[in-house]
Amino acid sequence: MALLTLESVDVSYWRADTAVEVLKEISLEIRPGRLLAVYGSRNAGKTTLLEVAAGLLTPDRGRVRFEGKDLSHVSRKELARLHREEIGWIERDGPGAPDMSVHAYVALPLYRNLSHAEAQARARATLARVGAAGCANERWMDLPHSDRMLVAIAGALVREPRLLIADDPTSGLGIVEREAVVGLLRSVAEDAGVAVLLAAPEMPAMLHAHDVRTLSRGKLIGPSSRDRGAPVIDIRRRRRPA
């Protein structure tokens, strides 16, 4: 059963006196335990799609349902709770205080409901879970880009969300690091039963996704479902003539 559903979603913005359609009749289901990747070129509307899915942007038309609830009809208080507890957005900007340690940054959203010791313990466990335990005592500003992305993922996962949203998490990474990040997101989906929605402009970022959709001219093309290890593009060997 789908955790999040987009139903015939349209989003437009005005440029001078002209309406520019960003998303057109987008319908999408995001299920627990699955990594769904949306591929599209720069300025294809991927970030807008993610913001709509997260309830950060209300569409002009259509509905966004989280567990059957229309997000446009929930109260601000309930929407804020969903963003604190149910929907995790991977933030790539890091902490506002440059001298804050990584483990303190990851623990920060937990202090509302947990003791200081409990928050610190969960933060360190989450950093270890994503392979960033060695960064715990470092400062964000001192980390290489690849480690920053792991810490950003930990910062979203530490709240134990049911939906995790990643906007171009492979940006600026090399091939090996890019594959490791997307592989990690797939593992998060499978191991914890989290629904993961990822958007990226590079096709290699789709390699570990369970399902792949293409966003082109505001419309989704697909779906394409893939098993573990299956290539995005199947290039078959041609038999040589005898």
Image: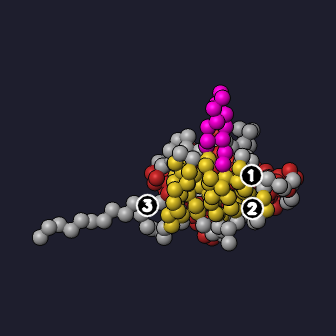
Looking at the figure, which quarter contains the N terminus? Answer: bottom right
Question: What amino acid type should be assigned to the residue bearing mark 2?
Answer: Phe
| Quadrant in which residue 122 is drawn | bottom right
Residue at the spot 63% in from the left edge and 69% down from the top edge: 33
Q: CA distance from mark 3 to mark 1?
A: 30 Å
* Chief secondary structure of the magenta portion: strand
Q: Judge the density around disc 2: few (<14), some (14-19), many (≥20) Cα neighbours within 10 Å.
A: many
**Residue flagged by tag 3: what amino acid is it?**
Val
Q: Is residue 159 magenta?
A: no
Badge 1 amino acid: Gly
Residues at marks 3 and 1 touching, judged by CB atoms closer than 8 Å: no
Give residue 66's mark.
2
Q: Are marks 1 and 2 in contact (CB under 8 Å)?
A: yes
The stretch drawn in magenta includes residue 18? yes
Q: Secondary structure at mark 2?
A: strand
Residue 66, x across and y down, in percent: 75, 61
Q: Which x, y percent locates residue 150?
A: 61, 53
Spatial CA span between label 3 and label 2: 29 Å
